[in-house]
Amino acid sequence: MTSGEAMRQQQEFSAPVINGVSITHKPQRSDKAKIVPDPLVKVEHLSLFYGAKQALQDIEMNIPRKKVTAFIGPSGCGKSTLLRCFNRLNDLVDGCRIEGNISINDKSIFDADVDITDLRKKVGMVFQKSNPFPKSIYENVAYGARIAGINKKSVLDELVEKNLKRAALWDEVSDRLNDSAMGLSGGQQQRLCIARAIAVEPDVLLMDEPCSALDPIATAKIEDLVTELKDRFTIVIVTHNMQQASRVSDYTAFMYIGDIVEFDTTEKIFLNPAKKHTEDYVSGKFG
Amino acid sequence: MPKLWKPGDAYIWISGLALMLTLAMIGGLLFLIATKGLGSMWPVDIGRYKLTDGSVYLGQFQGRELVRGAEGIRSESDFRVKLKIGNRDLYGLDFKWVDEADIASLDYPNNAVILERREWGNYHGYLKEIRKNGEIVSGADPEAFSVLKSVIHDANKIHDEILKIEKGEIGDINYGIEKQRLKLRGLSMRGENNSAKEAEFRLKIEEYEALYKVSEAKLEKLYTELNRNEVVMSSAAGEEKVMPLGKIVMAFRPNYMGFVEKAGFYVERFWGFISDDPREANTEGGIFPAIFGTILMVFIMSIVVMPFGVIAALYLREYAKQGLMVRIVRICVNNLAGVPSIVFGVFGVGFFLYGVGGIIDSVFFKEALPSPTFGTGGILWASLTLALLTLPVVIVATEEGLASVPRNIREGSLALGATKFETTWKVVIPSALPAILTGLILAIARATGEVAPLMITGVVKLAPDLPIDGHFPFLHLERKFMHLGFHIYDLGFQSPNSEAAKPMVFMTAFLLILIVVILNITAIIIRNRLRKKYATSAV
Ligand SMILES: Nc1ncnc2c1ncn2[C@@H]1O[C@H](COP(=O)(O)OP(=O)(O)O)[C@@H](O)[C@H]1O
Ligand SMILES: [Mg+2]
């Protein structure tokens, strides 16, 4: 493909945003959404606006239960934005407006009777930049439990140990649980954040580029962890890294400028994508 | 040719220079205060100055300065020395300027003695005799001085006992009588005609009065014992003086002491200075009540200003809708920091003393009226006034601290299902704690140095009692108190004997700075601990 072609293609995709017009429902994409056998999260006609700027355009997708779903796409295409819709973290952003619907277990998360703190307990999140609290390692993991009013030491001890083990961090920190979490390395901090998130026993675990700031060894550890955790959690992971997506995920969505270009099993996306655009991206021709 | 000046260099040099200047100023000030203050306690040798006019003085050299004659000629005769000659009862003044030309001879007699007295300042002279229990020990006896020391020691013990009775026992009795008297007064004010109760109160008062008689008798006995022994001194010119030992604090012979002994004496004296009550219109003795008052006031202020400042900042930064209103409030808070402190003092008088204090008195202390309890200056009102004064500092620092807590930490907490309040309380405030403490440090530094608002809200020249004592409720917030800053002003500018007070001014200033530094260092250590514990920078 010549650069001219690539540009044309890009223009084609960016046109709807520039015009600020909601693109209409595309039946073939909707078909792709239905390929998921046992959906836990359903996204229906989801559009999101930051003020006047549209960041997500009529998204339609289903996220399978107890599988790893990866979002890939160039930066600024709306991966984080979409992820943050699932736990309604975008509610904090001034001027953010959402249209359409997301339901988890067939219950809309936007219903008036939904307690947002309950929702966030069910939908945990791990952030791009590790963000341990300025507290001890122990208190970081116990945080969710304490919020829930659990203060009994024996219960907390058990919870901390269990989740640090699940996050493959226990062996490294078991002898210094009361040290500040800030003293851990970047990779350890990120695994601590995972332990902290899964300690709340969420149904869904959102991970927004969890390895982008880590070295290859720490990245590998987190990837292993993701693979192990998918038996228990439904995981949605945003990544920049094609190899990572292909290694850890079962399903992959390729996003481009607020839109899902293609969503299918990871195998299909990487080996036999339906769209030329997807193929160009996963093969590293642009992005 | 290499360029000597790169374009930006000038600015670096200028800022470096400014920094140097600041450091030099701070250093110079501290040096001046420390040397003048700390030096004044050193037991300087005592010289016998024989003057050309035939008079003789025993004096400690205090300084030498040039006297500029009308011709502007500089010669030996143009210098004069300042001597501390003591014996205020004899000479009228403790200090004397002597022209060097007038000094006929100078030597340092080993047997010159300095007596530190409870009245009239120091006595410089020679030991003539000691009258102890009817016996007479001559000053010529080689053991005379150690005898003198031991009798002074005994006398001091008796003196302490007297003080204990006066402050302790008699204080308790007065306190008890006052309480019963107020109860009686309360009865009559309420118009109750309860003769049984009245009789009970009167009986109690009588009991107290009987106790008082006992204490008084004890005191009388101690006083006669104290004043039975006497010391006879002779001045430089040979004038004799008989002094009861009860009037003497200590005796020393600087010319006889070696360096080590002097150093020991110095430490002892320094300790006395920070642990004793003042004497003689504050120009002698220690400054303990002022140190205590200053620290207690800063503590009370901190306890009040912290929660208020932090809550206000939390509201402004975390909860209030950011807009014009919040901007205006913020500007007002910043401007408040620039209001002259005396204005806060006046507000304190009007609002706390007369307003709040008046109401408290009329509700809880009716019996004592018209003499006010809380309706007058006291440590609580002074502390609250200073809390108001330092509130802006704490608010601004806390706001900055809150603003610097990274957003992703807040999101991390919210994403775990914490409410906004839980997030603020458990994550944001701990992260902002170092900055909050910085605010407190600044507030303490400002409050410790403030004098003007205190002068009208509760500081006095001499407070008879500390704000903390053994009577319930132990902490007496309504009491007036002493303060180092005011002490400096009082000694330096209100003292009848300003020469004698001068070293005290420097010492007090030195201690005030020391206390600010100690309080700050404590806060900084705490802050650094917290920083380590709560460091917010990742990796
Ligand atoms: N808080 C916000 N306010 C306004 N625009 C935003 C905000 N967050 C993200 N955006 C915009 O939305 C688009 C999608 O951003 P994001 O979801 O962060 O992309 P990605 O995670 O895929 O890199 C970008 O164009 C970004 O500039
Ligand atoms: Mg992103």
Image (cartoon, rainbow, N blue to C red):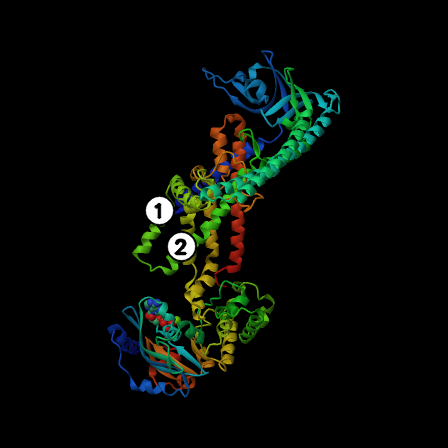
Counting residues from the N terminus, which is met first, the one under dot 2 or under dot 1?
A: 2
Q: Which residue is mark 2?
A: B312
B474, above or below A229, in the image: above
Quadrant holding the N terminus of chain B: top left
SS of the residue under disc 1 = helix
| Image coordinates for residue B77, horizontal then vertical, percent | 53, 16
Q: Chain of mark 2?
A: B
| Image coordinates for residue B10, horizontal then vertical, percent | 39, 44
Q: Is residue A276 visible?
A: yes
| Image coordinates for residue B501, horizontal then vertical, percent | 53, 29
B506, above or below B15, in the image: above
Q: Give how far apart the Cα atoms at labels 2 and 1 are.
A: 16 Å
| Label ID, residue B335 | 1
Q: Chain of mark 1?
A: B
Residue nearest the observer in this picture, B178 or B117: B178
**Dividing the image into four equal quarters, which quarter contains ligand 2?**
bottom left
What amino acid is at disc 1? Asn
Residue nearest the observer in this picture, B219 or B36: B219
SS of the residue under disc 2 = helix
B50, above or below A177, in the image: above
